[in-house]
Each structure stands twice: as structure tokens, then as C-alpha cells.
Image (cartoon, helix red, strand yellow):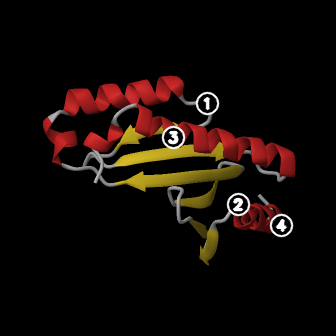
Amino acid sequence: MSADAMQQIGVHLEFLGYQISQDGDIMRARHQSQPNFLVRRLAGGILFVSIFGCNDNAKRDRLGYLEMLNTLNDKASVARFYADKDSDLFIEAWYPDHYDRAEFGIFMQAWDRDIMTLLMAGADRYLR
């Protein structure tokens, strides 16, 4: 991915209301009403990653937590949901290595929709 495409994506995210900061090869996107996420280059494209800490319910009700993640993955269009060894929730999506304003806008709408499925799936009982 060219630095130019990464820069254009950063500008687009700023237009969407995100505050962008750069830490080496990682771009941080922070928003007042949307979940924050990291952006980094991976496998010829860009990986978007949002991480949510989980409470003790995710560890006590491991089966229910994993079933919820399966439901989220079944409904997602661009994101994938998984838990790490500490049961923290990771949401990732990969975007190709070019920038097109309309295509990226569609991707971001799908990313936002996928993340909103957390609320509909009852994830609040597992998240901090």
C-alpha cells in the first residue's frame, strides 16, 4: 500500500469525524460516538482492528460468549469477530491496497453496520 493511499484513507476518516494520529506504521482513529480502531498495513492491504475488553461474564459463560461471536460472524459483511486468550473481543476487517472515495465509503458503512450488530447481539453483557 502506498503512503498516498494510507494518507487518503486518513483524510477520509477525518471527514467522517475521526481524529487521526500516526504511531509509526499504525494509524489510530478515534471518534466521539463510534468505536475507535487501529489501521495498519497487512498482506497488500489495510487491516482495521477494534478491540473491546470483556468482563468476567465472557469467561464464566464461555459457550454463550463464543455463540454470540459466531452469530456476529454469521451476520457480518466485512468484519470478523474473535476472542483472544483473555476473552477480549477483536473486530477486524481487511481493505484492498488502493483508495477510491466511493468504494471506501461503502466499506466504512459496512464496517459501521457490522460493529452495530454488537448491540443487537446482546454483547453488552460481555463487554466492559
Sequence-first disc among 1 and 4:
4
Residue type, numbered disc 1: Ser
Q: Residues within 10 Å of mark 3 (few under 14, many from 20)?
A: some
Residue that carries the numbered disc 4 in the rendered image: 4
- Rounded to the nearest whole Å, what is the CA distance between mark 3 and mark 2? 16 Å
Quarter of the image where one finds residue 69: top left
Sequence-first disc among 3 and 4:
4
Query: Above or below — where is 34 with respect to 109?
Result: below
Residue that carries the numbered disc 1 in the rendered image: 77
Sequence-first disc among 4 and 2:
4
Rendered location of residue 4, percent (x, y): 83, 67
Quarter of the image where one finds residue 94: top right
Residue that carries the numbered disc 3 in the rendered image: 116
Cβ–Cβ under 8 Å for marks 3 and 4? no
- Rounded to the nearest whole Å, what is the CA distance between mark 3 and mark 4? 30 Å
Q: Nearer the viewer, residue 40 or 8?
A: 8
